[in-house]
Amino acid sequence: MPLNIVQNNIVNMKVDAIVNAANMALQRGGGVCGAIFAAAGVEQLQAACDRIGGCAVGEAVITNGFNLPAKYIIHTVGPVWRGGGEGEAVLLRKCYINSLTLAVQHDCESVAFPLISAGIFGYPKDQALQVAVAAIRDFLADHDIDIYLVIYDKEDFLPDTRLGAAVNSYLAENLAPDHSRDYNIVRNVPAAETEEAEERYQALTVGEVFGAPIPSQSKSQAEKRIGELELDETFSEKLLRLIDAKGMTDVETYKRANIDRKLFSKIRSNKEYNPSKPTAIAFAIALRLNLDETLDLLGKAGYTLSPSLRSDVIIRFFIDKGIYDIHQINLYLFEHDQALLGA
């Protein structure tokens, strides 16, 4: 199951558990903690926390969600930033791993996190983000659970600035001027609707699938191209052949692609299955395909990478640089308000 990054208020997330950036005394605080207490019901949540008594830095405890849409609240105490030399990164990683372990123990299928320690605890936001993504990615390698990283204010979202500058430079050089209809879809899709969202996407018109309305002449050319592809192997057939050629397992493939297991099973069982464009690209990233190989795979589903689409140019950048970590790619797609891959 995937990692998704969304801009939202965490108290509104319809997941099995949300994570509270708590203090050691488990008392109502400010920021995310204060908002969660207010939404859950201050008196009943404080009483539940008082019964627990406290929580050490890096550890996690759990209470009911009370008035929240979430069934549970997982409380974890992040480290205060002291310059980075006192094991802050290790403790912050433990916050994510221990919270997710607790969620799995309580049969949660979906969890939403804030960016822990990046508020009043002073952890640099770019470093806090990298620790969060790395910890979640490593946990997902061995577990199936939907995880949301919830960003309340985009100004608090700071991926690596050096890589970000390189992405922006590449966009300036390669993005065609007519990109007023940049490919973008709603990212905040509840976990239970991932398959339904994928199926809704497949119901779009030819023009919508390619990312913008297609004039009559080019639309005819596009339909002709799709017709020609039908004479060759399908997307599903080519994907499965590439997985075998790369010596990868199904599990390794859909996890690298940030794809839900159920969706992958549907693709595997139906050779005529035509995925959405973000899903098709996600598999190309998972398989570490070069640009020509990526375009060939996308062509089986009727897509391409357009120089007029901001999302496509960002993806070209990462392929050109040989960076195939889909979660890192998604950080920059999110920063530019583009649809995430896989999730």
Image: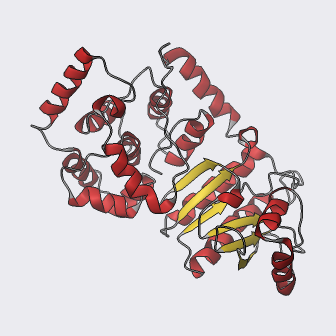
How far across and how far down the image is residue 338, in percent?
A: 53, 35
Q: Is residue 191 left or right of residue 157?
A: left
Q: Residue at x 76, y 69 (%)?
A: 40
Q: Is residue 20 left or right of residue 258?
A: right
How far across and how far down the image is residue 39, in percent?
A: 77, 64
Tell which of 75 and 196 is nearer to you: 196
Q: Is residue 61 left or right of residue 168?
A: right
Residue 105 location, quadrant: bottom right
Q: Residue at x 20, y 21 (%)?
A: 220
Residue sitting farthest toward the bottom? 51
Tell which of 108 and 288 is nearer to you: 108
Where 194 falls versus 44 (above or below)?
A: above
Residue 15 location, quadrant: bottom right
Where 18 falls versus 3 (above or below)?
A: below
How far across and how far down the image is residue 81, in percent?
A: 86, 54
Q: Is residue 171 visible?
A: yes
Where 94 falls versus 9 (above or below)?
A: below
Q: Is residue 15 left or right of residue 115?
A: left
Residue 285 location, quadrant: top left
Residue sitting farthest toward the left? 231
Q: Is residue 87 visible?
A: no
Residue sitting farthest toward the top? 177
